[in-house]
Amino acid sequence: QVQLVESGGGLVQPGGSLRLSCTASGFTTGNYVMSWYRQAPGKERELVAFMISVGGKAHYADSVQDRFHIARENRTYMWLQMNHLKPEDTAVYYCGARHSSFAYDPAHWGQGTQVTVSS
């Protein structure tokens, strides 16, 4: 059974930085696409970034391009470096994974970690 655990959320001032981590367990053989999503109060969950594979190309939402950086150190560990944070980045951030070579919409979700950007 796939489990995803996020960590690293918290309160940060505008312009600050945070790093989120996601650790996966229960992966079978084959490729897993891993991703980050977020959901702000009263809004739908939205894609932040994803990587098809370890060492593969990173893809970002326009709203975080050039401020956030996604990386996968191995098949089961991923992090999201968030710089120049804005109040509109406030949301619950979720780690997602799908057993696929191309589809990034998650079949598995973590429990989420709160990120609050406020002075």
Image (cartoon, grey):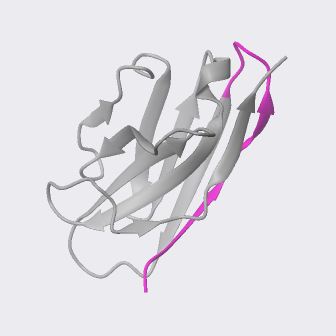
User: Residue 45: where, in percent of width, then height?
Assistant: 46, 45
Q: Quadrant of residue 23?
A: bottom right
Q: Is residue 100 left or right of residue 12?
A: left
Please determine whether, in this image, residue 28 is positioned above or below residue 96: below
**102 drawn magenta:** no
Most extreme residue toward the right is 119
Q: Is residue 28 above or below residue 42?
A: below
Q: Is residue 16 magenta?
A: yes
Instruction: Name the residue: 45% across, 22% down.
Output: 64
In the image, 2 versus 107, the foreground residue is 107
Q: Which residues are magenta?
A: 1-17
User: Closer to the camera, 106 or 72?
Assistant: 106
Q: Quadrant of the N terminus?
A: bottom left
- Is residue 24 shown above or below 105? below
Q: Give the vertical position of 19 relative to 54 (above or below).
A: above
Identify the residue shown where x is 73% and y is 15%: 14
Quadrant assignment, res 105: bottom left
Which residue is rendered at x = 24% and y = 50% of the image?
A: 52
Q: Position of residue 41 (x, y in %)?
A: 63, 40
x then y, percent, for residue 117: 73, 25
Residue closest to the eye, 57 or 41: 41
Quarter in which the C terminus is drawn: top right
- Pick out the residue farthest to the left: 102
| Residue closer to the observer: 119 or 28 | 119
